[in-house]
Image (tube, rainbow, N blue to C red):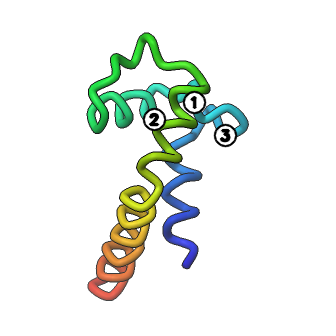
Amino acid sequence: MFAPLRFIWNATRGHRLTPWRSEYFRWRVETYSGIPAETLKFSDILGFVWNSRWELLSYLAWTGRMDREARKRV
């Protein structure tokens, strides 16, 4: 349950109150959507997150599963 939150916390390091300014987050949005990272604005990020919400939630669930698997093996 906390793994997705931990991922979001780590992915927005340095920009936690303004995640749309995070270089990592912009790169990920550019990679997934094809929108150039230099032109991304808050409204673009918000639209992307809303339109891709189910895929993003699925990805966060996957990160949780991977985190649990990694902790089992340690």
- Residue closest to the eye, 13 or 34: 34
Q: Residues within 10 Å of mark 2 (few under 14, many from 20)?
A: some
Instruction: Calculate the distance from the C-alpha at mark 2 to the C-alpha at mark 3.
Output: 11 Å
- Residue closest to the eye, 24 or 70: 24
Amino acid type at mark 2: Phe
Indicate left or right for 17 with 2 as reference.
Answer: right
Amino acid type at mark 1: Trp
Which label sits on residue 16?
3
Q: Which residue is mark 1?
A: 20
Q: Residues within 10 Å of mark 3 (few under 14, many from 20)?
A: some
Amino acid type at mark 3: Arg
Which label sits on residue 62?
none
Residue 72 at x, y percent in the picture: 33, 88
Residue at coordinates 41% horizontally, 72% vertically from top-left? 61
In this view, which residue lies farthest toward the top?
A: 38
Residue at coordinates 43% horizontally, 28% vertically from top-left? 26
Q: Quadrant of residue 54?
A: bottom left
Q: Sequence-wise, which precedes: disc 1 or disc 2?
A: 1
Quarter occupied by the N terminus: bottom right
Residue 19 at x, y percent in the picture: 60, 35
Q: Quadrant of residue 67?
A: bottom left
Q: Is residue 10 above or below residue 17?
A: below
Q: Is residue 44 above or below residue 70?
A: above
Which label sits on residue 25?
2
Dot 1 and dot 2 residues touching (CB under 8 Å): yes
Q: Is residue 26 above or below residue 63?
A: above
